[in-house]
Image (tube, helix red, strand yellow):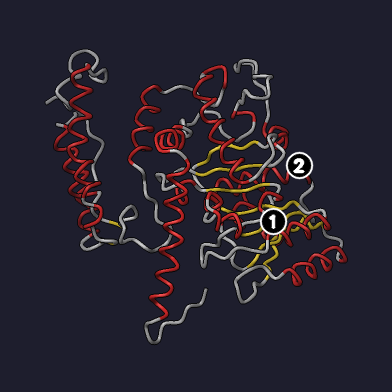
Amino acid sequence: MPVAGGGEGEHPLELSPQAMRRLVDLAMERIVPFVESLPRQKASNLERADEAARAVAQELPEKGRELAKVLGLLFDQAVPKGFGTAGPGYLAYIPGGGLFQSAVADLIGDTVNRFVPLWAAAPGLATIEADVVRWFARIVGYPPQARGYLTSGGSLANFGALFAARKERLGDDLASATIYASDQTHHSILRAAILAGFPEASGREIPSDGRFRIRLDLLAETIRGDRAAGRRPFLVVGNAGTTNTGAVDDLPALAELAAREGLWLHADAAYGGFFLLTDRGRRALAGIERADSVVLDPHKGLFLPYGTGALLVRDGEVLRRAHAVRADYLPAMAPEEEKVDFCQISPELSRGFRGLRVWLPFLMHGAGAFRRELDEKLDLALWAESELRRIPGIEIVA
């Protein structure tokens, strides 16, 4: 039976216009009720999850099935089990709103299927993604020469930052380099350091204070000790919203220390960075513009689907020096400053068009809509804290 009422004959993968519309219509018949029901869905639904997973497991099919049945398997068996990360009742870990507008952007981007990492292959779409990066740099307070790229999330963005910093400051001599981060820093920093070639012993964990911020006095003391022992203090991580508590390090003081000691300052703002769109966020994150690199997660602070992260570097040429290579099968790279070849400033060549899932919601609604939503989240956090304080036996630790 045809999968979507079309695609039969000699080339079954080539759907007719009618079949394409039918496919999307059938999918929307499932998607819209799912989104509409989010407020009523459980925050976590793992009852008989093993049984549901076994029901979903399939052998490699030789023949296609009717799309309605496939969608039934997906939405009735696979989707309901797990954490309801897009629903309002989900408060654990880091929720991901998953804006529907971004899902439509992905449909468009995947359909046109242009090769965005090369400007010459998709000038307009590469410009759209470059604009998104430029918007993010402006939000952070970076100068015009800043560059960056979109990633699948904060973990790979942190890896990109450590790799670029390593290439810029150390080259291939990593033996005695040391990296400093607080005991509240996300574990992806250590993993990124290992992936970037550093021995695990290169990491220095610095205790945090009563507000979960890195102890600057102990950081300075540890740096002095490492220098005395013949090691090379290299990079320090500043937190702009920790995963555990939302704490923000003293970024201006950390920037002063990094400048004085000649360290690369990396700001992990995956959690809190987009609160820079708000007045309160800008005050809390003051000093982040002095960091050499910043990681942001649009799938947190901008409510986008998972798989949307970003790395920004204040001196964009650092990224080019770290990643640029030549190959005979690649066209000439764009020489003009405003024409960005992302394959020359990032690790990836073939990849999806990530920029549209950010660009389309911003063009539809404007930055003001995101600013208002983020301000609401700050208000909700303060309200929740005040209500919790009224409950006997509850201790507010952060």
* Vertical placement of residue 46 versus 99, above or below: below
Relative to 286, 21 lies left or right: left
Q: Which residue is mark 1?
A: 199
Q: Amino acid at mark 2?
A: Glu
Q: Classify mark 1: helix, strand or loop.
A: loop
Q: Which residue is mark 2?
A: 168
Q: Residue at x 39, y 56 (%)?
A: 95
- Front label number (2 vs 1): 2
Q: Residue at x 33, y 61 (%)?
A: 90
Q: Residue at x 25, y 46 (%)?
A: 35
| Residue 229: numbered disc | none
Residue 319: % across, % down = 68, 36
Dot 2: within a 10 Å radius of its alpha carbon, few (fewer than 14), some, or many (20 or more) residues? some
Residue 298: % across, % down = 48, 46
Q: Amino acid at mark 1?
A: Pro
Q: What is the quadrant of residue 305 in the picture?
A: top left
Dot 1: within a 10 Å radius of its alpha carbon, few (fewer than 14), some, or many (20 or more) residues? some
* Vertical placement of residue 345 versus 42, above or below: above
Please, which residue is most extreme toward the bottom here? 392
Q: Residue at x 30, y 61 (%)?
A: 89
* Foreground pick, 157 / 74: 157
